[in-house]
Image (tube, rainbow, N blue to C red):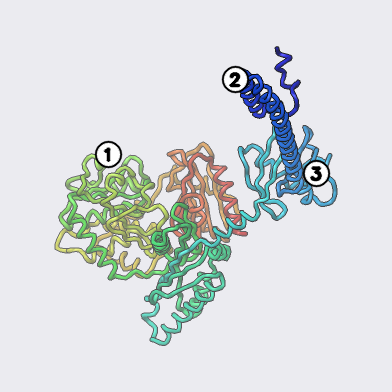
Amino acid sequence: MNRFFNVNKLPEFLQNGRIRILFTIVSGLAIIGLVAAFWANIIFGFIFFFLEIGGLIYVIEILKRIGADSTQYISDLSFRIERGEQEALIAMPLGILLFNAKHEISWINPYLQQYFGEESVIGTKLEDASPELTELLVGHAEENGPTKIFWKDRSFSVSIQANLRVIYLMDITDYTDIEQRYLDEQLVFGMVSLDNYEEISERLNDSEASALRSYVTRELTQWTEHHGMYMRRLNTTHFFVLGHAASLLSAENDKFSILDTVRETTSKQNLPVTLSMGFAYAEKDLTKLAQQAQANLDLALGRGGDQVVVKATDEEARFYGGKTNPMEKRTRVRARMISQALTDLISQADHIYIMGHNNPDMDAIGSALGLRRIAQMNDKPASIVVDSKNVHSDIQMLLAEVNKVEVEKNAFVTYEDALINSTDDSLLIMVDHSKPSISMEPQLYNKLQSRVVIIDHHRRSEEFPANPLLVYIEPYASSTAELITELFEYQDHEQDPINRIEATALLAGIQIDTKSFTLRAGTRTFDAASYLRSAGADAGLIQQFMKENVDSYMARNHLIESVKIVGNAAIAMGENDVVYDNVVAAQAADSLLQVLGIEQSYVITLRNDGKVGVSARSTGQISVQMIMEQMGGGGHLSNAATQVADSTVGQVGVQLLELLAAQES
């Protein structure tokens, strides 16, 4: 039976399963018809028999022909598929490379061969045939799925099957070009502001002011046209810039040289005009794009102007410029408006909490005392949030002096008490800083973040409270204490005036931040100092505050002894396992600037919180702020710092040296 039904023994046309079924059905019907014919009439049966024989022969021939045609079709199709596969391997734009266990090239298709030239590479090790390609492939060998590489001025999508020892390279240059063109043609919005044009034009006649404005407009127009951007004036001091991402990249590669061009040219004419710009990109919503550009401009102005901020919505900001000290442009009108707005906010609060940055200095505590007095002059209770156990010796002496004259002894509270007692109607004033992450107690900020006032003299950073009620940031001021002192002029003096200790603390903050009025001290600084002296500020007590103990003195000198000179920079580093006080490190950095030929100084030490701190100082010709920002910190152009987590003093020192080398290049 098995032999009878062996398919391979059947005629060729019956080896097709479908034809075999059809033949079986036809044969069965014929047999049934033949039996019925003989049953009805024997003569009719014979006639029907011969007809069936003829029909069966015809059907068999037809089935043979169908079977033969099907076999031929399948054979032709198989041949075409095999030939197509072979031609594809040879002619299609897909590079195929086979290699053996020794990484020698076993076979390569003609398409990929053209990238190696006319010389055959079969039998050659891949690293010898193309070191560049080998390096690229090794860098992506562990990746799952296709990866993109750039080789021989072309873009390839590479897949590596290590188990089969096969490398596939798909040329995707055209798609990459289309993608790059899409990225290059994305819209960019820019906002440009003349920082101090109004202040300068006040002392010019109409023709001189018009000439200055025309010069700046002409330079801006030429600069934007050079980089393929379009500029439109919005008003006397503001411009709108429209361009593509490629235009922005060109401007960034140029380091926004227009800043230096305008500043240097106008400075030669004693009319130093500076520019600030904010650029936004990578946003489909044009309204959001415009809002981001304006926010970037606000950030540039908040950092003192004369710089550019480039930032997309979900990316970190990139800063250009900011190499010069900001020029003073605040007015007493603004101080009066801020004073009045602050008074209104204080009057609406049930309690005022004043908080400086962590590890507060004399400027932060002095400013806080001044603000507390302003709150009291408006009949509102106020408390300064401070951890009196973790402050430097000068702050400890100040706190002791304050407690001597305070009747209620409630000037200072711990952050635990502030968290417990603050309500939704309380007001939080952040002084001498604007970054919540470095506040004395970030949790208190989180609780009162909808009721926040910021008063600071540091350049604004990218990290900033979302919706503060009032912002008074003036990078042109010498200190926050100077800003607070000016606010007293517009307060009700029928209330209790500023007392001797508060005036002394404010003056100490100004004196320390200006290095005894030798750094960033303007006419307004001396006006504030004069007011504080008239209010009873004690210069002798300031000197007492500024004294240091023997341990701090010895630690500072030890740091100075470790100094290394790199060009015009002095770098001192503490030990990896020795904790130094932050004030000691800052004092060491100040002292190093007294060395002849030193224009910037850096002191790197281990802090008591386990982080590595860097205190940076300069004479004003070099922006140490930009260096510190690249390390996650910030500050002023000539006075900045940072804290680095999960690192050693030596590692931070290496990072600093790399940044200094990049700055030189």
Residue beneath the point at 17% across and 63% down = 492
Q: Which residue is drawn at 59% across and 51% down?
A: 657
Mark 3–mark 2 Cα distance, whole angstroms, equals 91 Å
What amino acid type should be assigned to the residue bearing mark 2?
Answer: Ala
Quarter of the image where the N terminus is located = top right
Closer to us: 80 or 633? 80
Amino acid found under the numbered disc labelled 1: Glu
Q: Can residue 165 be seen in this view?
A: no
Check the image and name the residue furthest to the top: 1
Eyeballing the image, is 243 above or below 313?
A: below
Q: Where is residue 52 in the image (x, y as percent from the top left)?
A: 68, 26
Q: Tell me which numbered mark, 1 or 3, is placed earlier along the sequence.
A: 3
Q: Any mark on residue 128, and which? A: 3
Of circles 2 and 1, the one toward us is 2
Q: How many labels does the image show?
A: 3
Labelled disc at residue 40 = 2
| Spot occupied by residue 442 in the image (x, y as percentages of width and height) | 34, 44
Q: How far apart are marks 2 and 1 (CA)?
A: 115 Å
Q: Provide the secondary structure element on which disc 1 rests.
A: helix
Q: Mark 1 points at which residue?
A: 416
Q: Along the polypeptide, which appears first: circle 3 or circle 2?
A: 2
x and y percent of residue 510 in the render?
A: 35, 59
